Image (cartoon, rainbow, N blue to C red):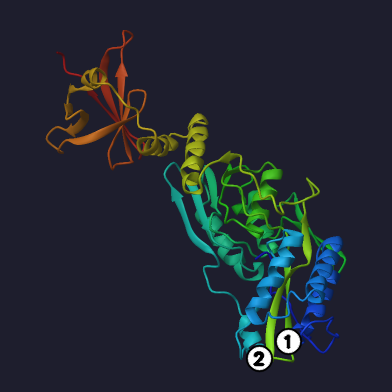
Amino acid sequence: MYTKLALTSIVICSSLALTALGGDPVEQGIIGEIANAVEQNYVYPDKGQACAMRLKSMLDDGQLDEAQGEAMAGLIRAALIDVTEDLHFNFQAMPEGWSPPSSEDEARQRQAPSAPYGFRTVERLDGNVGYIDLRGFNNAQYIAETVESAMRLVQGSDALIFDLRQNGGGDPNAVALITSYLYDPSEPVHLNSLYSRPDDTTTEYWTRNSIDSSLAMPDVPVYVLTSRFTFSAAEEFSYNLRNLKRATIIGETTGGGAHPVDQLLFHSDATDRFYTLTLPTARAISPITGTNWEGVGVEPHIACEADDALDQALLDAYSKSLKAGNEQARFGLASINARLNPIELSENQMREYAGNYTDREIQLKDGKLHYRRIGVSDFRPITCVGEDEFMIEGLTSFILSFARDEQGKLTHIDGIYQQGHRDRSLRASN
């Protein structure tokens, strides 16, 4: 949920506050309250008014006469979403006998969330690519040290990937905090604004200069992985970076939720039952587009199935890093190609590679090339991953590179190791 506050606000409304507008008063005395709350606080006044008219019409027409509990909640929820097409709306009946939390319960809810605050994985992938699997944007006041530790772990990366494919959102302050590490702290960047209708105020969100500037990565290429489940604050992170041309978005178009919510609690005196209304009361406003991603989502630069997004990001990152002179990226690119894009060779092409090379041997067996280091290892299958380049299946830290003379005849093999050294084996004369 995309919340504008650290904790969702709860307002308790009693059905005695307003007179029911008609119908069986068993539970429907709260309909007028709900209608008024939506009309006065929904982010778009015209749609809020339309929602109120729809609910009052349903009550006057008797559509809610026989509905109680979750049945009534379902009808109201469907009506609110039908009018607004806003998936942030929710209305539900609490279980019978449920009562609001005590002050002690509320105090416990205000305690810091548990570590690691949505950071599922932080690691360095092959090719010196930093990878952060972030499952939520937890309250910024609690996560600052964890964010700093995560960014310290990926320092020196040649590219950085944020995986938001399973991120449902959270605190916009956390979005600003994490984004701050992707810019020069001395030059604040306006990321987003939130307009609150109940307060009639607009809050701007900027990158922060209070972070450890030594951990900032303003020049490192950034990738953001998305899915249709990427929602709210996770969409803001993606939307901001896309519009600022700071990241490449890869995956699926996101869910399309840009409206922070408040939560209202209603009580039916007739049945002593509580209902909760999740009410969108604010909207995001990009300083670049003047709008947001509500209802349309964030469109990726490279569209693909969510399950394929990481591979596509790595392919792009490795390719660009290798062109920039980073030899480490060569191994990552070769490994990805071995799995996704292996080069199929004809039997004649494979026979050309087969033979003895000083202390190495290439053998064609069962329609596939096999490699061994003579006297050291057994034969293992190899896969062609590029022009005259092969990888041993299951080994990502070593590449076999075949060399040719001016006439195109194979002359030797270079063994290229990820640690940085090479060795050479000359082809034996026929």
Residue marked by disc 1: 267
**Element carrying mark 2:** loop
- Say if 96 sits above or below 49 in the image: below
| Residue 370 screen position, x and y as percent | 20, 31
Distance from Cα at disc 1 to Cα at disc 2: 16 Å
Judge the density around disc 1: few (<14), some (14-19), many (≥20) Cα neighbours within 10 Å: many
Judge the density around disc 2: few (<14), some (14-19), many (≥20) Cα neighbours within 10 Å: few
The quadrant holding residue 88 is bottom right
**Can see residue 160?**
yes
Q: Is 118 situated left or right of 370 in this image?
A: right
Tell me which residue sits at (41%, 44%) in the image: 126
- Say if 42 sits above or below 326 in the image: below
**Element carrying mark 1:** strand
Give the tally of numbered discs: 2
Residue marked by disc 2: 102
Mark 1 or 2, nearer chain start:
2
Q: Quadrant of the C terminus?
A: top left
| Residue 361 screen position, x and y as percent | 17, 27
Tell me which residue sits at (39%, 33%) in the image: 341
The quadrant holding residue 279 is bottom right
Q: Is 39 situated left or right of 223 in this image?
A: right
| Residue 163 screen position, x and y as percent | 53, 53
The kind of residue tagged 2 is: Ser
